[in-house]
Image: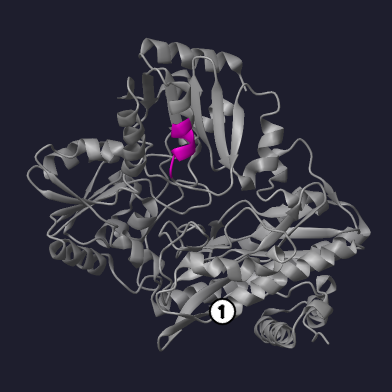
Amino acid sequence: MNRELLSKLRALMSANGIDAYLTVSTDPHQSEYVPPFWRRNTFLTGFTGIYCRTVVTKKEAMLWTDGKEELKIKKELKRSPFKYHIKPLVTADLNDEISWIAEKFRKGGVIGVDPKLMTITQMEALKDTVAKQKGLSIKYTDENLIDAVWTDRPQMPKSQVTIRGKKLEKVSVKRKLKLLAKSLKKANCDLHVISNLESIARVLNSRANDIEYTPLVISFLIVGTKRSYWFVDKGRLSDQDLKMLPSELQVLDYSQFGEKLNELSKGKTIMIDKNEVSQWVFNCIHETAKVRYQSSPIVMMKAIKNSYEIKMMSNACLRDSLYLAEAIYWIKNEAKKRPVSECELIDKIAELKRKDKNFLELSFEPIAAYNKNAAVIHYEPKTLPKCSAIKPKGIVLIDCGAHFSDGTTDATRTFTVGKFKPEVRTNYTRVLKGHIALNRAVFPVGTRGYHLDAFARQFLWEAGLNYSHGTGHGVGYVTTVHETAGFGITPLRGMPVEEGMTFTNEPGYYKEGHYGIRIENMLHVVRKGNFLSSEQMTFCPYEKELIDTKMLTASELEWINKYHKTVMNKLRPMIKDKALLTWLKKACEALI
């Protein structure tokens, strides 16, 4: 961390009459992963975690992140002027940050924010605090102050944009826009403003490579009852792709969005989702417009996949399950011959996935964590000065996924590479029991994501143990591995579970300085009558050496054996390597 940068930022704050500058690690589209162009907090603090909020005052510098980043932040902020606070769970709200500011400025002060980075909901919470505290006020900065001291800032990404055809998308762009127009009319609205990149990708069947790990297009979209507008550089689309778009959709430059929104919204009723849209977007709406806040109809369009999309995603997950099994087989054998670095294993995982003819890109940086490193939930060995060597002793955790043209994947396995402590087997079995419980859960229609969270945690709780991340997240259809539709298996997600939703089941346990365990499958929700359950999409063996059969019930044992039999039946036809097939047969043998 360059302390001189912090001094320059404070000088700009003083020049603008700002006492506390609040910023978040996202972009004008509230994305999880952002291109280098918008990684302001990483530039300012040196912290590379995904979830990061900062407040800089004239004397102090504070950073907030979540439990998954705890061990990373201890290392990266060791000599930093930034102090930090760990949140127990990821939240979109800024309550902790706002409370900290309010405590520091009881006698009044000016809070500076970039309105492009704050959702309307976040700003409402901030305004509520300001209203309650005498003398405290908010100032929007026309330009982000961090940008002014970022002299070597990367360029805005502008990759080639493609429109997916009928082989990948059964519902056309024209049809989707008609469905949205119908929703607008039903809600008595004229326009719907969309800034969420995942939503835009799903509506327009568009993909690009603007952001690492997410094949999305940086753009804005305004949907109307008769005409719609896509704000993206037209030069990024080929003539053939432009022809695939309906005539009712006009393509304009990204930079024209604010001005065009102001023009189109004059005297109109505008539908916006204030949990997704930034305060800046709201500020661009014409003063004569009537704004109607409601959840975007695209939310359910994303969360609930049709039968064709489920089929495509299942195919992608099956192939990816084989690549994960191949990686496990490779490291188990290679570690016996020589020390293998975690970084080399990560490269091997990527190599196996890239050979798939439908491969687009990884859905996140693969995690390959050996022994105590696996206790770091978001472990990234390639960001460290040196990768640890995997030796034939202990356990390894692999968490990886990819975007294929037919689906997005995410799976985790923890397995042995040599002798391990009995405690590891005990806790692996506890995690596995919770994983099975959620896999087997049958629940009534109307059940919400947070209702299911305890299924996976119960056996850890019995032993006084827990984990500091959600049990599962929604997975997008070739968009983002952490779907922004709002569905998840976590205390923070209240969306009802519905047929067609795709999600992960990934309980874990992490003992700092010793080891980490996580087991993750992808599933999709099915319905029978008034009840829901889930079906597997991931087919990779569990680590039998780490399963204490004495801790299992007869039905749990039966479930594992049935699952392994299915794994064998599904993967066998895809395997040409006899040695790999021999290993898989042994890995899938029935437990007694």
Percent of width and height locating residue 152: 51, 23
- Residue 77 higher or lower than 526, as above or below: above
Q: Residue at x 79, y 43 (%)?
A: 387
- Residue 319 higher or lower than 34, as above or below: below
Locate the C terminus and report the quarter of the image it occupies: bottom right
Q: Which of 17 and 254 is in front in this view?
A: 17
Percent of width and height locating residue 523: 54, 73
- Residue 78 higher or lower than 419, as above or below: above
Residue 590 among those drawn in magenta: no
Percent of width and height locating residue 42: 56, 32
Q: Which residue is drawn at 60% across and 16% down?
A: 3
Q: Can residue 51 be seen in this view?
A: yes
Instruction: Say left or right for 429 vs 399.
Output: right
Q: Which residue is drawn at 68% across and 85% down?
A: 559
- Judging from the image, the colouring scheme is one colour
Q: Which residue is drawn at 51% across and 36% down?
A: 36
Q: Which of 212 and 62 is in front in this view?
A: 62
Main SS type for the magenta part? helix
Q: In the rendered image, which quarter is residue 516 located in?
A: bottom right
| Number of numbered markers | 1
Instruction: Say left or right for 193 vs 121.
Output: left
Q: Which of 433 and 104 is in front in this view?
A: 104
Instruction: Please tell me how crowded label 1 is: few (under 14), some (14-19), or many (20+) other residues with Cα within 10 Å.
Output: few
- Residue 33 higher or lower than 151, as above or below: below
Locate the N terminus and report the quarter of the image it occupies: top right
Magenta-drawn segment:
93-99
Q: What element carries label 1?
A: loop
Q: Can residue 256 be seen in this view?
A: no
Q: Which residue was labeled with disc 1?
A: 441
Instruction: Say left or right for 285 vs 149.
Output: left
